[in-house]
Image: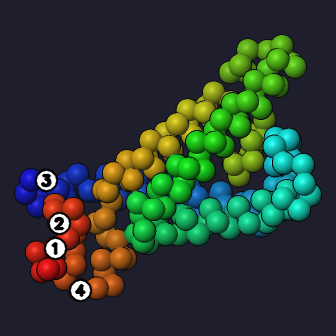
């Protein structure tokens, strides 16, 4: 693979990295700046009964999302951050699906007609749209986990001569 084709592949991935990072910064700030509202939404999932754990989740999770988003925007620890975000998105998506199934059964409406605020920081949404959105975000995180998206990464700007190449991120100048 020559350098030109490697860079052509990396541009969409960098855009995806920036999109995912910006999304997590935005939604994390939405939740983090109003922790009481986020606490009420977390409580609706009925996954944790301890007030200490509920408060800990509501107080720290949004800021952890902001931190992960900032790492992706800067291009620091892209693969580890992508793994972390996929690891958060997968069980959260399952919890959203479960809550939607419970609401669907209680309201006796079609599954895709279920609409609620899932606590994502984007307000009330139809569940089928939210599940498709989360599936796309999971796929994007897994794509970044594959090792792409290193172009325009701060990690490589901090140490001269270590720009990623097609040989797995190591430059020819590195022994």
The C terminus: image quadrant: bottom left
Q: Which residue is mark 2?
A: 165
Helix, strand or loop at label 1? It is loop
Q: Is residue 33 left or right of residue 36?
A: left
* Residue behind mark 3: 5
- Circle 2 packing at 10 Å, graded few (<14), some (14-19), many (20+), is some
The residue drawn where x is 22% and y is 78% is: 162
Query: Disc 2 vs disc 4: Cβ atoms closer than 8 Å?
Result: no
Q: Position of residue 154 (x, y in %)?
A: 37, 76
Q: CA distance from mark 2 to mark 1?
A: 6 Å
Q: Residues within 10 Å of mark 1 (few under 14, many from 20)?
A: some
Report the side of 52 relative to 159 (left or right): right
Instruction: Say which label, 4 or 1, has the lower sequence index.
Output: 4
| Label 2 close to label 1 by CB (< 8 Å) | yes
Q: Is residue 161 left or right of residue 130?
A: left
Q: CA distance from mark 3 to mark 4?
A: 23 Å
How many residues crowd mark 3 within 10 Å: few (<14), some (14–19), many (20+)?
few
**Are the residues tagged 4 and 1 within 8 Å (C-beta)?**
no
The answer to which image quadrant residue 98 occupies is top right
Pair 3/1: label in front = 1
Separation (CA) of disc 2 from disc 3: 11 Å
First along the sequence among labels 2 and 4 = 4
Judged from the image, the secondary structure of the residue bearing numbered disc 2 is: loop
Nearer-N-terminus badge (3/4): 3
Please rate how many residues cluster around mark 4, counting C-alpha atoms within 10 Å: few if below 14, some from 14 to 19, many from 20: few
Query: Circle 4 sits on which residue?
Result: 160
Mark 3 falls on what kind of element?
Answer: helix
Q: Would you name the residue on which mark 1 appears? A: 171
Q: Position of residue 33 (x, y in %)?
A: 77, 67
**Image marks 3 and 1: residues in contact by CB distance under 8 Å:** no
Q: Nearer the viewer, mark 3 or mark 4?
A: 4
């Amino acid at each position: 693979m020559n350098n030109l084709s490697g860079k052509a592949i990396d541009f969409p991935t960098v855009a995806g990295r920036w999109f995912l990072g910006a999304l997590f910064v935005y939604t994390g700030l939405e939740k983090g700046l109003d922790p009481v509202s986020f606490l009420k939404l977390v409580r609706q999932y009925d996954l944790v009964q301890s007030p200490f754990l509920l408060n800990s989740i509501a107080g720290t999770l949004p800021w952890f999302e902001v931190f992960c988003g900032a790492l992706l925007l800067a291009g620091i620890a892209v693969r580890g951050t992508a793994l972390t975000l996929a690891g958060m998105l997968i069980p959260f998506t399952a919890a959203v699906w479960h809550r939607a199934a419970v609401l669907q059964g209680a309201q006796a409406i079609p599954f895709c007609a279920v609409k609620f605020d899932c606590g994502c920081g984007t307000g009330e949404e139809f569940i089928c749209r939210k599940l498709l959105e989360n599936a796309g975000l999971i796929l994007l995180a897994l794509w970044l986990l594959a090792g792409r998206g290193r172009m325009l990464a701060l990690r490589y700007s901090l140490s001269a001569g270590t720009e990623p190449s097609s040989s797995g991120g190591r430059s020819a100048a590195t022994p």
